[in-house]
Amino acid sequence: MTNQNIMRLIWVVALLSLCIVVRVKAEEEATAAPVKNLILPGESFLVEGRSAFILWPPEEKRQKPQPWIMYAPTLPRYPDSHEKWMHEQFVAAGVAVAGIEVGEAYGSPAGQEHFTALYRELTENRGFATKPCLLGRSRGGLWVSSWAIRNTDKVAGIAGIYPVFDLRTYPGLNRAAPAYELQPDELAAKLDEYNPIARIDVLAKAKVPVFIIHGDIDNVVPLKENSATLVERYKQANAGDAVELVVVEGQGHNFWPGFFHCQELVDFAIRRAKSTD
């Protein structure tokens, strides 16, 4: 082998080595990068390829089984800074908060499958309690209520901050239909099956406890068609004592601090997450 060939070989080996080093470093950085940025200490991870998270209580306050709150909507920006105080109260009380990114699922069966995957991961592999309290903010109400309707035996309670229960009011059938893999007219024909507000009686008959705070001038998620209708359905099922609705006068669908600093909601969610019934 000539000196020229030897030098070429050396350069090839060096180049390959450099490529390997760069690739390994990139993989290490990808592994180290958080799956989701969190507002409080916790961990982010993947469940069946979906971004999920846990906000953990301090080590000394964790339990076996671990009480927890299943939160929605887990989108890239949620939970957000407006909710920080609320989640601080949960973890300080020894209650974990967890959620999974399902995109704009609007309570669809596909989204519910991901909720179930998170539930199984936490209860079967991480020692979490089998009956979390669900917390839905805005369209997160569609997610948690639709899952709860099909899993009443796995739900300790439902808390809501101006939550959606009626697909027709938000996001509307045209926007929701793709998440259900249906055309708008097809979804309209199946609302008795898919629209949570049409099946609230399932929750009422199971007497799943509910606490909601909602503004009386909410033009995005109207009070009457959503939270107020849920309360009425509970009363019709003789389960009125299982639901509480706080109506805030003069507030709409906004970042008013009272929505996220509601001590009654926090106390309800902690109490239900820690319940054994």
Image (cartoon, grey):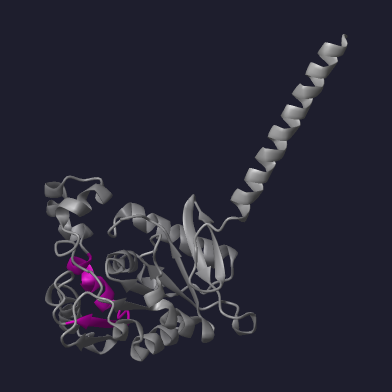
In the drawing, does residue 33 fall left or right of residue 247? right
**Image spot of residue 145 (x, y percent):** 29, 69
Q: Quadrant of the N terminus?
A: top right
Which range of residues does the magenta coloring cover? 196-215
Q: In front: 131, or 14?
A: 14
Asked if residue 274 shows in the view, the reply is no
Q: Is residue 98 above or below residue 270?
A: above
**Image spot of residue 12 (x, y percent):** 75, 22
**Image spot of residue 32 (x, y percent):** 62, 55
- Which residue is located at x 45 percent, y 79 percent? 87
In the drawing, does residue 271 fall left or right of residue 170? right
Q: Is residue 269 above or below residue 221?
A: below
Q: Find out whether residue 12 is within the magenta segment.
A: no
- Which residue is located at x 16 percent, y 76 percent? 218
Asked if residue 39 shows in the view, the reply is yes
**Image spot of residue 63 (x, y percent):** 60, 80
